[in-house]
Image: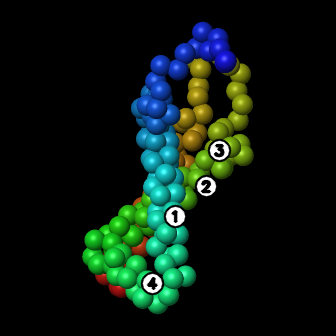
Amino acid sequence: MLENKGHPNRLGIWGWLGGGKWGLERYLYTLHRLTGLGLLFYFLLHIFVTSARAFGPEAWATSMGTVSGPLFVVGEFLVFCAFAFHAFNGVRLGLIELGFAIGNPIEPVYPYRTSVHEQRPLAIVMMVLAGLVVLAGGLDFFILH
């Protein structure tokens, strides 16, 4: 049995989702987790629906008939939005993990500086880019299509 060594996890699932101070980065963290789970759910649903093709043309037509209509177009757009956010936030997280956008190391003298001030501009740029991709996708989904 594992010991907590005096640091019990009192937050449980809430600690996994959110926990900690709520700033821009924490909202991005939570939304990244939720969109990842949503994309996983969509992927499994997509495999289930497209597997009907293996059972013949009638099964395929029935399967595609159940997932068509204006409600599903909105659902597909939400999946696209989740993908755009998740992709751009993933690039941001990858750049941070590789050491970009965290600033140069400084001597730890009070008052301590965090790298949040260095990371926030990258977060804002990435979310603006994700927003532009979502706008372009919305144009394609609803106006040009």
Q: Which residue is mark 3?
A: 96
The residue pinned by badge 4 equals 60
On residue 91, which mark appears?
Answer: 2
Find out whether the residues at labels 2 and 3 contact each other: C-beta distance under 8 Å: no
Identify which residue is drawn at 51% across, 64% down: 43
Judged by depth in the image, the label closer to the viewer, 2 or 4, is 4
Q: Is residue 108 left or right of residue 63?
A: right
Label 1 is placed on what type of residue? Phe
The residues bearing labels 2 and 4 have C-alpha atoms spaced at a distance of: 36 Å
In this rendered view, identify the residue nearer to me: 11 or 133.
Answer: 11
Q: Amino acid at mark 2?
A: Val
User: Pointer 1: what residue?
Assistant: 43
**Earlier along the polypeptide chain: callout 2 or callout 3?**
2
Q: Secondary structure at mark 4?
A: helix
Q: Nearer the viewer, mark 3 or mark 4?
A: 4
Q: Can residue 130 be seen?
A: no
Discs 2, 4 touching: Cβ within 8 Å: no
Q: Are marks 1 and 2 in contact (CB under 8 Å)?
A: no
